[in-house]
Structures are given as C-alpha cells and as structure tokens.
Amino acid sequence: PNEVVSLEGRRQPLNCLVDYVSFSAHVDFVQNRDFIGKVEPRHIILVHGQKDEMGRLKSALMLRYKQLPESKRPSVIMPPNTQEVTLKFTRRRNAKVVGSLAERSVSEGTAVEGILVTQNFSSKVVSPDEVAAYTPLRVGSVGSTLHVPFRGKIQVLQLFLEQMFAAVTTTIIKQEYDASDDATMTEAETEKQPPTSSLSTSSSDSNIVEFTLSEGVDKVVIRAGDTDGMVSVQWEASPVGDVLADAVVALLMQAQSSTASIRLSGRPCRHGRRAPETADEQQQQPPPNKKGRMEDVDDDAAAKEGDNRNENVMGVLHSVLREQYERVELEWTDGENKELGGSFTITADSGVETEEGGLVCTASVTFDENSNDAAAKIAVECEDSKLATNVRDCLVSVATASAPLGI
C-alpha cells in the first residue's frame, strides 16, 4: 500500500517496505494446501485443529481434486475425536520373467508357473531349473538311502516289483576283481534289461542288480548284490518319491514272507510220491506250472515263470478256484500261446445234479494279445445264477489284484 493509518487515525504516506510474518507454531491454510499438493497422498486425514478451519481446508481440497478421475482422487476425511479410521492400500507388484519362461509366447490371462525371487526390492520369476543361473540362490536336494534286510532271491524280487508297478527298468552291473587284490572289486559294465525280461540265477548271484522305478523327475532305485542279505533303496526326498519308497519297502518285506515267495524260492523235496492209481486221482493232479506251486520246478523254471504275466495270472486263478470248488479243469485257448488265456470247467458238489454228479460251471478268461496291461475279459456260464455270480466275482477280484499298479 502507498498509505498507512497512524495510531491517531490520520493517513500518512508509506516510505518503507512492509512484510507479513506468521509467528504461529503451526502451518496455515496455504502452507497445508501447498504441502498436500506436492506430496499427492492417496488418503488425507485432517486432525488437531479448529473444526471450522479444518472444514474450510477439507472443502478447498475436495474442490481442487474434483476435476480428477475418481480412481485417482484422494480421500479426504475429517473424523471426530476417538473415531477409528480404516484405510485400504492397494499394492501392485511387478516381476520380471527371465530365462526359458521369457521365451514362451503368452497372452493376457495365461498362467506362468515358476519361482518368485525378490532381492533389493526387485522381483523376478524364473524356472526351478534356472534358479542358480539367474539368482544367487543354490538348489539342493536330500538323498535318502535305506538298507532293508532281504534273504530272498533276486528273481522273486523282480517278479514282485513287476507285478506291483507297471514300469520297472532292470540294470545288471557286471563286476570285475582286481588281479592284485582279490578283495578289490570294480563295476566294469552295465547292461539294461527289458522290463519283462527275467534274470537268470547266474547273472543275479554274481553281479549287482538295480531296479529303477520312475515317475516324472522322481526316481527310486532298488540295488541288490552289494551286501549279502541286504537290499538298498535309494531316492531323493519328495512327496512322490517318499510314497514310492514306502511302497517298495513294504513290498520287500512282503516278498520274503508271503506264501508265493516261499513257493518260488523253495526247493523240491526228495521224498518219494505215490503214483496216481485211479482216473479221478490223475484228473485231480494240479497241472505243472499253472497253479503256481513249485514243488517239482527248479530255480531256473521259477525265474522263467515270471516271463509271461498272463500265464501267471491264469495260474493264480486256477489255484484260487481249486481251493474253493471240488474239481477245476483248465483248458488253454491256444496251446502254443498261453498268453491268450483259457477256460475253467468247475464242478461243484451242490446245486442242480448232472450226469457227472455235480453242477458244472464254465468260466472263460481272455487276454488282449495287443495290450500289455494284463486286462482280462471274463465270461461265466452256469445253470445256477448264484454259483455263476460267485465264480465271476472271484475271478474279477483276483484278476484286478494281479494287475500291476501304474505309477
């Protein structure tokens, strides 16, 4: 101004510079408004001030931000004392996809699976196989080895593994002894066997045999021959690997204590046997190598029995039926190719009487020659529906239990 009013009320010309200075301990309206404009917060809470002045500041701020889109407009709150205020913060997290995952062509909405690694507030997504290449992290694994006592034969172990699991890889590790030291032994050569091949007694007794079960990246190795009377189970710790290892350990215990194992590994007795005198006694004699009894079969024949899975299943079926019915006869569909199955003629001692003196029931079991999963087609014909149902249920249950489990 050019004039000022004196204390006496007279106007005097202004001959000096005048500046206004606020001596308040708090910021005023203009300073608050400028500070909020520079910070650009998402939420504004007005407290500790006169209600009228805070209301004026709130109205001015809301009028200023009214021109902004609602998504970018900050919230202005002037709560009374002791009122609880809840704020919601939305955080966007960005991560850079690197390595082989970045080479894939993806579109919006496509799921990308990997490991999220954050370092110094920077995140990246990498494949589990490339963690060591793109991050300072190092990937490790826990290897487990369990030694299980096993006094059975390797051929029996192979048969049980192939009956339980669908894919078993057999590897024979040939050994060589150092000429300078008979106690030193080296692994000289390995030989992989097909899944359905049977080990001979000589190869399994003198060499180390490995059976490998694999499911994706999980693998369980059963190694026999390193120590007499001991089998080692090796695997890397994982949910699937631990389940497979537990199943293998249970199978090892079962393979040396079950009735089937005793029959396969037992030796024939040397006691003389009375020859069958009548036709009925000859007919009741179990057919060799069908029922699974190994009284007159040597070790090589026991190993050979594991070659044909379908023939073994037919033998188990014949054995179970003989335990339940008076007389059971097995007739192969093709005498030369026993893998196709056969038919059972069952004579029961109850029900409708026939000329043969009992009720006759015919059950046919047919295998698909083009399939390797031992799937069987079972058909039963009998005049007594109850007996037919019992025979069919028995055959189906045994065939299902004999089929290998997929891993």
Image: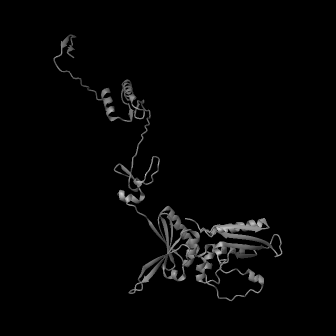
Q: Quadrant of the C terminus?
A: bottom right
Q: For residue 359, what is the image quadrant?
A: bottom right
Residue 211 placement (x, y as % from top left): 51, 73
Is residue 59 visible in this depiction of the protein? yes
- On the rendered structure, is 151 left or right of 27? right
Q: For residue 383, what is the image quadrant?
A: bottom right
Q: Which is more toward the observer, 140 or 198?
A: 198
Residue 288 placement (x, y as % from top left): 67, 81
Is residue 151 visible in this depiction of the protein? no
- On the rendered structure, is 306 left or right of 183? right
Work out whether 105 lies above or below 162.
above
Q: Which is more toward the observer, 357 or 42?
A: 357
Q: For residue 393, what is the image quadrant?
A: bottom right
Question: How is the model colour-coded?
Answer: one colour
- On the rendered structure, is 9 left or right of 47? left
Q: Residue at x 44, y 65 (%)?
A: 142
Q: Quadrant of the N terminus?
A: top left
Work out whether 70 lies above or below 262.
above
Residue 12 placement (x, y as % from top left): 18, 12
Instruction: Give the mark count.
Output: 0
Work out whether 73 lies above or below 278.
above
